Image (tube, rainbow, N blue to C red):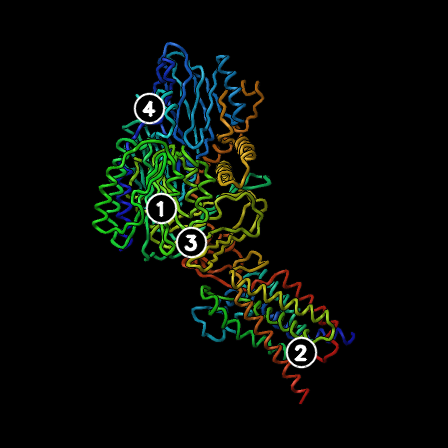
C-alpha cells in the first residue's frame, strides 16, 4: 500500500469512528429521542454533543454521514486531527446555540449537518491559501455559494434542494455551522502563521 | 370596543338584506305569447349528500303538461356557485333518456332535429352566472314526466361552519325584456321535500336549517352523522339553507385524492385550515358604503336597505368616519367627504339616506370610482359594497374593475344579494382588493353572516398565502394562492398529480410582515378510487380559474371558449360552451355522440355505493400515517402536524445532493493539492 493511500486511510479513521457511532444509534430509535436537542431543555449540555449523532431517517443519516465522512477526512488531510477537533468543537457550540435563538419555533433538533457545513467552510477556507489561482477561486465560489444559500434559506425560511423527509430543514444550523467552521479554520491558520513567523 | 362597533354596523346592514323581497322562485317557464299553460309541477324532491368537503345534490321533479297539445317544457333553476351539473335524466312514461355533454352548438342542432322529429329529447344549458335551463321536447298532452339532475359543489368550512344553500329564489337579475317574455310557474301542487344526509369525519356541534323544522331526523353529533328530512311549505319560492357546525378543530391539512387504477394522472382536493393565531385589529378605520340604488332595487328593497344603513351608521363610534356613495346610471357621493360618526352628523345623514329613491340603470364602475376618491392613506379603509352586481351602464367588464382596484390599498367586502347575481364580477372586485364576498340568501340566518364577516374584518389577515408542493409533480392547480386569507377561511385547492409517493406541502404566508412557513409530508397514492367526483370538481374549478383569468385580461377571450369547451366535454360538465343533451341510446348512436358521461356516471355511482357501506374516512394528512408508524424511526404522535400549535416541530439539517457534490469536489482538490504536503 503506498503512502498516499495510507495517509487517506489514516485521516479517515476518526470520521469513520464517529460515523460508526451514528450508524449504531440508527438501530436504537429510543436512544435517538433521548439524545436529541430539545428546545424546552436547551441547557441540558450533554445533548449539545449528542444531538449531532442522531438522525430522523435513514435518508437523513445517509446524506449527513456521507458528507461528514468525506469532509472530515479532507479536513484531517488539510490540517491534521487538531483542525478537525477545532472545527467540530466550534460547530458543537455554535449550532445548539443558534438553533434555539434563531429557530425558536422548533421542538427538537437532530443531525450532523451543522457540523457538515462547518467542515465545508473549513475545507474551503484552507484552500484560500493555495498558490494556484483556480483552486483559490473554487474555494471562494464554494464559500460564496454556501453563504448565499444559507442567507437565503434563513431569510426565506425555505431550504434549497431539500428533499422530502419527516423533519423541517433548519437554515440557522447551516449558517451557524458555516460561520463557526470558517472562523475556527481561519483562526488555526493565522495561529500557525504567527508561530512560523515567530 | 371596535369589534362590537363593527358587529353593530354589520347588523344594521344585514337587517336590511333580510327584508329584501323575493320575486320569483325556480320553476317552469312558458313564453307569454304562446297561449299555453306552464307545465304543472307535481312534486319536487331534493336529496343532498354532504361528505368530505363537497355536496352531491340530486333533484327529482315530476311535472305534467295540462295543455291540449304537446309542448316543450322549460325549467329554470338558479345556478349554485361552483356547481358542476353532471347528470340529467328524463323519464317519459316508460322511457328513460340520459344525458351526454357536447359542444353547445352541437347540442342545439341535435336537440332541434330530434324535437322536429317528435322524438324524446331534452337539453340542459347554463346561462352565464344566472341559471341552468332545462328544455324537454315533445311532452304530449296530459303526459307526466320526471326530470332528474345531479350536481356537485365544494363546501368549505368558514369559521367552523359549513353552509349549504339549495337556491330556488330567482334573483330578479334578468333584464326586463327577458322577464316580460316568460310566464313563470313556481308552484308545486304536491310535496317539496329536501333530504339531507351528512357524513362528517369530524364531530358535529350542531345542525340547523333556518326557518325549517325537520319532519324526520336521525342525528349522531359525536360521530358526525345526520339524516334529516324537510318539507318546504313555500314550494319553490324560497331558498333552502342548511348549516352544520363542527366542534372546535385545530389547524390542519386534508387531502382527498382520486386516481383510477392504471391512470397516468390523479386528481386531488386539498383543504388547508390555517392554525395560526391572528390578533384583533385595534386601529381606527374608515368605511365607505357603496349602495346599489338602481331600478332593480325599487320598492321595498331600497327602503329596507336605507333603514339598514341608517342603523349601521347610528352604531358607529364618534372617532369613526364614513362616506356614502350611491349608484344607479351614475354615481353620487351624498356625504361629499368623510363624515365623523358624531351624533349630530349621524342624525343629519340618516334623514338624507331615508330620502333615497331607486331607479335607472346599474353603473357599478362609477360607484366604485367615486368610493375610491378621498381615501386617506393613514387610515385603514374598507368598502362595503351592497349590490347584485348586474352592471349594465358604463364600464362593465371585470377587467376594468380589476384595473381600477389593483393599485389601491383598500379592501372591498361584498354582500351579493339574492341568487343569479353576478358573482364572477364580485369575485374579481373582491379578490383584486384582497377582500371577500358573501352571498346573501333571503332564507339565511343573517346573524351568521354578520359573525362570519366580523371575525374576518376585526382580525389580522394572512398576506400572500400560498401552497407549494415538492417531491411529486403536480399540474393545473387552482385556489392555491390568496392575496389575503382571513380568520376562519380555508384554502381549497384542486390539482392534478403526475407522479406518486411522498411529497412535501409547504404553506407560506406573511403575518405582520414576517414570512411564516409551515410544512408537512403527504403521500400521493398510486390508486384511490373513493372519490371519482373530484375530477369534475377540479375541472369546474379550472373553468372558473380560466374565466377569472380571462376577466382580468390574462387569457385571451378567443382561447377561453375552446379551453372551457374541451374541459366541459372531457369531464362532462355543463358550461357556457357545452350543454347536456338528453336522448335515447339509439339517438346517441345515430348522431355519433360518445357515451363519456355514461361511463363516468357508472364509476361515480359505484364509488358512492361503496362510500355508503364504508366507515366515514378522515382525510387529514398532517398526522403520522400508519405506514410511518411501522417504520423503525417513527416519531411521536403528531410529528407531521402542519401548524406549530398542534404538535412538535422537528428540525434537522438539509444535506443533499448539491452539498455531497461540493464535498466530493473539495475532496478531489484536497487530495491533489494538500494531502501529501502535510503529514497527517
The residue carrying mark 1 is B383
Q: Residue at x 44, y 47 (%)?
A: B491
Looking at the image, how many numbered discs can be counted on the residues? 4
Q: Is residue B634 above or below residue A114?
A: above
The residue carrying mark 2 is A79
Depth check, mark 3 against mark 1: the one in front is 1
As measured in the structure, the alpha-carbon distance from the residue carrying label 3 to the one carrying label 1 is 19 Å
* Dots 2, 1 in contact, CB < 8 A: no
Q: Which mark is residue B186?
A: 4
As measured in the structure, the alpha-carbon distance from the residue carrying label 2 to the one carrying label 4 is 90 Å
Q: Few, some or many C-alpha atoms within 10 Å of disc 4 (few <14, some 14-19, many ≥20)?
A: many
Q: Are marks 1 and 4 on the same chain?
A: yes
Chain letter of mark 3 equals B
The residue carrying mark 3 is B462
As measured in the structure, the alpha-carbon distance from the residue carrying label 2 to the one carrying label 3 is 50 Å
Chain letter of mark 4 equals B
Is residue B203 in sight in this rendering?
no
Q: Few, some or many C-alpha atoms within 10 Å of disc 1 (few <14, some 14-19, many ≥20)?
A: many
- In x, y percent, where is residue B641? 45, 56
Q: Is residue B427 above or below residue B602?
A: below
Question: Could you say which quadrant of the image residue B667 lies in?
Answer: bottom right
Q: Residue furthest front?
A: B336
- In x, y percent, where is residue B351? 22, 41
Q: Is residue B153 above or below residue A134?
A: above
Q: Between disc 1 and disc 4, whose residue precedes?
A: 4
Amino acid at each position: 500500500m503506498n503512502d498516499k493511500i495510507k495517509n487517506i486511510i489514516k485521516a479517515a479513521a476518526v470520521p469513520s469512528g464517529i460515523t460508526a457511532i451514528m450508524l449504531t444509534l440508527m438501530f436504537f430509535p429510543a436512544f435517538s429521542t433521548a439524545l436529541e436537542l430539545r428546545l424546552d431543555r436547551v441547557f441540558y449540555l450533554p445533548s449539545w454533543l449528542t444531538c449531532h449523532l442522531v438522525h430522523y431517517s435513514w435518508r437523513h443519516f445517509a446524506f449527513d454521514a456521507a458528507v461528514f465522512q468525506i469532509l472530515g477526512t479532507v479536513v484531517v488531510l488539510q490540517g491534521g486531527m487538531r483542525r478537525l477537533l477545532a472545527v467540530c468543537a466550534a460547530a458543537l457550540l455554535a449550532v445548539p446555540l443558534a438553533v434555539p435563538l434563531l429557530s425558536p419555533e422548533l421542538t427538537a433538533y437532530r443531525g450532523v449537518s451543522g457540523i457538515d457545513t462547518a467542515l465545508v467552510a473549513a475545507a474551503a477556507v484552507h484552500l484560500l491559501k493555495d498558490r494556484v489561482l483556480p483552486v483559490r477561486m473554487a474555494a471562494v465560489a464554494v464559500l460564496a455559494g454556501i453563504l448565499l444559500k444559507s442567507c437565503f434559506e434563513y431569510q426565506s425560511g425555505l431550504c434549497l434542494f431539500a428533499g422530502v423527509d419527516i423533519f423541517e430543514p433548519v437554515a440557522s444550523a447551516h449558517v451557524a455551522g458555516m460561520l463557526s467552521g470558517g472562523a475556527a479554520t481561519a483562526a488555526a491558520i493565522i495561529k500557525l502563521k504567527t508561530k512560523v513567523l515567530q | 370596543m371596535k369589534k362590537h362597533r363593527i358587529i353593530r354596523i354589520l347588523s344594521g346592514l344585514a337587517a336590511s338584506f333580510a327584508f329584501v323581497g323575493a320575486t320569483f322562485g325556480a320553476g317552469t317557464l312558458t313564453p307569454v305569447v304562446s297561449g299555453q299553460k306552464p307545465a304543472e309541477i307535481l312534486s319536487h324532491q331534493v336529496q343532498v349528500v354532504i361528505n368530505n368537503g363537497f355536496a352531491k345534490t340530486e333533484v327529482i321533479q315530476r311535472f305534467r303538461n295540462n295543455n291540449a297539445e304537446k309542448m316543450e317544457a322549460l325549467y329554470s333553476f338558479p345556478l349554485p356557485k361552483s356547481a358542476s351539473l353532471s347528470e340529467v335524466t328524463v323519464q317519459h312514461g316508460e322511457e328513460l333518456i340520459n344525458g351526454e355533454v357536447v359542444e353547445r352548438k352541437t347540442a342545439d342542432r341535435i336537440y332541434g332535429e330530434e324535437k322536429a322529429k317528435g322524438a324524446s329529447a331534452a337539453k340542459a344549458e347554463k346561462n352565464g352566472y344566472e341559471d341552468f335551463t332545462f328544455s324537454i321536447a315533445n311532452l304530449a298532452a296530459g303526459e307526466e314526466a320526471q326530470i332528474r339532475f345531479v350536481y356537485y359543489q365544494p363546501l368549505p368550512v368558514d369559521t367552523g361552519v359549513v353552509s349549504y344553500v339549495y337556491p330556488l329564489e330567482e334573483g330578479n337579475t334578468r333584464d326586463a325584456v327577458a322577464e316580460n317574455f316568460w310566464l313563470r310557474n313556481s308552484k308545486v301542487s304536491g310535496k317539496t321535500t329536501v333530504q339531507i344526509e351528512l357524513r362528517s369525519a369530524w364531530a358535529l356541534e350542531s345542525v340547523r336549517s333556518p326557518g325549517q323544522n325537520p319532519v324526520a331526523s336521525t342525528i349522531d353529533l359525536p360521530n358526525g352523522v345526520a339524516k334529516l328530512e324537510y318539507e318546504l311549505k313555500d314550494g319553490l319560492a324560497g331558498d333552502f339553507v342548511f348549516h352544520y357546525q363542527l366542534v372546535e378543530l385545530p389547524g390542519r391539512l386534508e387531502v382527498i385524492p382520486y386516481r383510477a387504477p392504471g391512470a397516468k394522472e390523479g386528481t386531488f382536493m386539498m383543504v388547508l385550515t390555517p392554525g395560526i393565531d391572528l390578533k384583533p385589529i385595534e386601529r381606527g378605520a374608515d368605511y365607505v358604503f357603496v349602495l346599489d340604488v338602481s331600478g332593480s332595487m325599487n320598492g321595498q328593497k331600497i327602503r329596507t336597505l336605507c333603514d339598514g344603513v341608517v342603523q349601521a351608521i347610528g352604531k358607529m363610534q364618534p372617532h369613526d368616519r364614513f362616506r356614502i356613495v350611491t349608484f344607479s346610471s351614475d354615481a353620487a357621493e351624498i356625504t361629499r367627504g368623510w363624515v365623523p360618526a358624531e351624533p349630530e352628523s349621524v342624525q343629519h345623514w340618516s334623514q338624507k339616506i331615508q330620502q333615497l329613491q331607486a331607479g335607472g340603470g346599474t353603473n357599478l364602475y362609477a360607484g366604485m370610482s367615486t368610493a375610491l376618491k378621498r381615501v386617506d392613506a393613514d387610515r385603514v379603509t374598507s368598502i362595503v359594497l351592497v349590490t347584485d352586481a348586474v352592471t349594465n351602464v358604463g364600464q362593465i367588464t371585470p377587467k376594468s374593475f380589476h384595473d381600477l382596484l389593483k393599485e389601491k390599498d383598500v379592501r372591498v367586502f361584498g354582500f351579493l344579494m339574492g341568487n343569479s347575481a353576478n358573482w364572477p364580477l364580485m369575485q374579481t372586485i373582491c379578490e383584486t382588493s384582497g377582500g371577500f364576498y358573501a352571498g346573501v340568501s333571503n332564507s339565511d340566518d343573517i346573524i351568521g353572516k354578520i359573525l362570519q364577516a366580523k371575525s374576518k374584518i376585526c382580525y389580522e389577515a394572512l398576506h400572500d398565502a400560498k401552497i407549494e408542493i415538492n417531491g411529486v409533480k403536480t399540474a393545473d392547480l387552482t385556489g392555491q394562492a390568496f392575496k389575503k386569507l382571513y380568520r376562519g377561511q380555508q384554502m381549497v385547492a384542486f390539482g392534478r398529480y403526475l407522479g406518486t409517493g411522498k411529497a412535501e406541502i409547504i404553506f407560506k404566508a406573511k403575518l405582520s410582515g414576517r414570512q411564516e412557513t409551515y410544512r408537512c409530508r403527504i403521500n400521493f397514492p398510486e390508486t384511490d378510487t373513493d372519490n371519482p367526483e373530484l375530477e369534475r370538481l377540479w375541472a369546474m374549478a379550472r373553468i372558473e380559474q380560466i374565466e377569472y383569468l380571462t376577466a382580468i385580461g390574462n387569457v385571451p377571450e378567443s382561447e377561453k371558449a375552446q379551453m372551457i369547451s374541451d374541459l366541459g366535454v372531457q369531464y362532462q360538465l355543463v358550461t357556457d360552451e357545452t350543454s347536456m343533451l338528453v336522448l335515447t341510446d339509439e339517438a346517441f348512436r345515430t348522431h355519433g355522440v360518445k357515451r363519456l358521461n355514461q361511463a363516468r356516471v357508472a364509476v361515480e355511482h359505484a364509488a358512492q355505493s361503496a362510500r355508503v357501506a364504508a366507515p366515514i374516512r378522515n382525510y387529514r394528512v398532517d398526522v403520522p400515517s400508519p405506514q410511518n408508524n411501522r417504520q423503525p424511526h417513527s416519531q411521536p404522535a403528531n410529528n407531521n402536524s402542519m401548524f406549530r400549535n398542534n404538535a412538535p416541530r422537528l428540525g434537522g439539517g438539509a444535506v443533499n445532493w448539491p452539498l455531497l457534490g461540493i464535498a466530493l469536489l473539495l475532496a478531489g482538490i484536497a487530495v491533489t493539492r494538500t494531502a501529501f504536503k502535510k503529514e497527517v
